[in-house]
Image: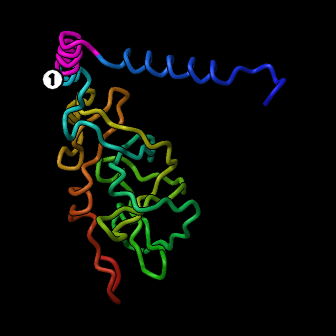
Amino acid sequence: MPGSGIDWDAARARLARLAAAAQEEDVLAPAEALAVLDARARALAREPGTEVEPGTLREAVHFRTAGQRYALESRFVLEVVRAAEVVPLPGAPPSLRGLTLLHGEVLPVVELAPLFGRAPSEASGPLLVIGEGRPELGLRTEEVEEVTLLRGRTLLPPPSTVDTSLVSAAEEDGTLVLEGEALLGDSRLVFDLSDEGAV
């Protein structure tokens, strides 16, 4: 465009020189290229310093009942029911608090304290619905506290004063880490819910 004051030919020539210079900078000499590749190979071959061993991290739900803190792997916790109506059963064992109706199915509600030689809690907090793939038990709690990651290296052996078939470890603060499969398979928590009642 005449009179605009822009020398387009000079601008194009300058852009061409810049593009050529940038391309020359991207091309490395053979020795430089070899040094860059060696550095990348060393970085890739280095063992990671903070790699986590398989199975050492587990997500767990922390809860409290009868004054004791527990942790249970979250894969066993199907849901938390905040206000479950529990129907007590006369003559039932101390670990069976009663029954509740969950999604149209009868679910036994249990108390952990008697399994560890403690008196059952009178509190009626949230219910942890646990099972493997389907609801099997409702655990009565005073409070569901948090979901955290358990690190295998920071866990302690279970105390000798508790049933170690149900507890796999303890945390430094005294929280008992429950063994989910053992809990669900414990004969003290298997009840006959037929017409005859709980056994």
Circle 1 — which element?
Answer: helix
Q: Quadrant of residue 78?
A: bottom left
Quarter containing the N terminus:
top right
- Extreme residue in the front direction: 2
Badge 1: residue crowd in 10 Å (few <14, some 14–19, many ≥20):
few
The image's colour scheme reads rainbow
Taking 83 as reference, is 127 left or right?
left
What's the amino acid at mark 1? Ala
Coordinates of residue 75 in the picture (x, y in percent): 33, 55
Residue nearest the observer in this picture, 135 or 173: 135
Residue 73 higher or lower than 97, as above or below: above
Taking 109 as reference, is 116 left or right?
left
* 29 is within the stretch colored magenta: yes
Q: Which residues are magenta?
A: 28-42
Residue nearest the observer in this picture, 68 or 50: 50
* 161 is within the stretch colored magenta: no
* Residue under numbered circle 1: 45
Q: Residue at x 32, y 86 (%)?
A: 194
Coordinates of residue 185 in the picture (x, y in percent): 21, 63
Q: Quadrant of residue 33?
A: top left
- Extreme residue in the bottom direction: 195
Coordinates of residue 44 in the picture (x, y in percent): 20, 24
Coordinates of residue 102 in the picture (x, y in percent): 48, 75
Residue 11 higher or lower than 183, as above or below: above
Residue nearest the observer in this picture, 112 or 38: 38
Q: Residue at x 41, y 64 (%)?
A: 138
Mark count: 1
Q: Residue at x 42, y 43 (%)?
A: 62
Q: Quadrant of residue 27?
A: top left
Taking 180 as reference, is 104 left or right?
right
Name the magenta segment's main secondary structure. helix
